[in-house]
Amino acid sequence: MNFQHETVLLHETVAALRPSPGDAPSVDGVPSAGGTWLDGTAGGGGHTALLLEAIERRGRIWALDRDPDAVAALLARFAHEPAVNVLQGNFFQATQLVHEALRGVILDLGVSSHQLDSTERGFSYHREAPLDCRMSQEGVTAAELVNTLPLEELRRVFWEYGQEKFSNPIARAIVRAREDTPIETTTQLAGLVASAVPAAARRDGHPARKVFMALRYACNGELDGLEEALTNLFYMLVPGGRMAVISFNSLEDSAMKRVTKKLCAGCQCPPDFPQCTCGITPRARVPQKPLTPNADELARNPRARSAKLRVLEKL
């Protein structure tokens, strides 16, 4: 199987973790020798491969992905790399899957190019395919959701997960249409959404984009518990370890910002207290400004246009 995926912010993400070979000196007092790393959304293995080079194969990398197609590609790519351990699973369950302290964590929260370009996976509204949208290829499909969810729940999904301002007319159109015939394909849903929004909205990108994003989140549970998952991964880091997270929209980015604010917070005592009594100290720091793709990367991969990299370091 040919698993094609253009890794976003490849060099910037790996560099943010400050990887180094085993005989390098310590960085800010953190020993460099070996170390364990997690690529929690390994996809085609781009970040994993570059990280493996940076540590000169002297540590251990856990390459984790929930998509069985990605896992098959990772197993083939790193078959002769004993430093890379490939696992199928969701990074939400990383504490159950990896029982080691980590030097660094990489998370790419976007959908992969392979998932978008594989018509049969049903992620794209541009091509005729079964309405699926499941990353793990298990569980409830998007077709099941649009054909069974009550009107109010459909409206909530489109608004909360897609920030779709026309969630009400779109949900009503879906409920009316499914009374006559089930909504089973991507283009069937895309056409239905387009017919439910004002003509002006159809000129601002594809009108079904936010609906498909919302259904993807609902099918895969990508936002439910995301802050808890990020926090758990942070606590798996050794002191000085870093977590690099690439988000692709404001919902994902806001979750990372809330986790960062909570972990970087210090004393909560009133300003007029002569000394701290709460005992709260920052557990993390932000070592660099958020990064976005440069012009060269955007020219090569337009899908990277909304990507943003944030980094958090454990104190």
Image (cartoon, rainbow, N blue to C red):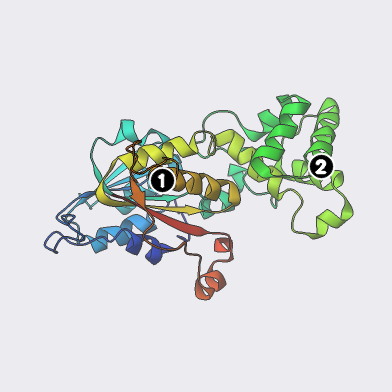
Relative to 278, say whether 60 is above or below: below
Which residue is situated farthest in the right direction here? 199
Identify residue for label 1: 265
Determine if residue 304 is in view. Answer: yes
Question: Label 1 amino acid?
Answer: Ala
Residue at position x 59%, y 51% from top?
250
What crowding class fits label 1: few (fewer than 14 Cα within 10 Å), some (14-19), or many (20 or more)? Answer: some
Q: Nearer the viewer, residue 20 or 301?
A: 20
What crowding class fits label 2: few (fewer than 14 Cα within 10 Å), some (14-19), or many (20 or more)? Answer: some
At which x and y percent is residue 29?
A: 17, 57
Question: Label 2 amino acid?
Answer: Leu
Q: Nearer the viewer, residue 82 or 25?
A: 25
Mark nearer the viewer, 1 or 2: 1
Which residue is situated farthest in the bottom direction here? 296
Q: Earlier in the sequence, mark 1 or mark 2?
A: 2
Q: Nearer the viewer, residue 224 or 298?
A: 224
Residue at position x 33%, y 64% from top?
15
At which x and y percent is residue 185?
A: 71, 39
Relative to 81, say whether 274 is above or below: above
- Left or right: 86, with 252 as reference point: left
Residue at position x 39%, y 36% from top?
89
Give the distance between the C-alpha atoms of the residues marked 1 and 2, in whole angstroms: 46 Å
- Left or right: 52, with 226 as reference point: left
Q: Secondary structure at mark 2?
A: helix
Residue at position x 60%, y 44% from top?
120
Identify residue for label 2: 192
Determine if residue 128 is in view. Answer: no
- Left or right: 221, with 12 as reference point: right
Tell me the quarter of the picture where residue 30 sits.
bottom left
Q: Secondary structure at mark 1?
A: loop
Tell me the quarter of the picture where residue 102 sits.
top left
Relative to 180, say whether 248 is above or below: below
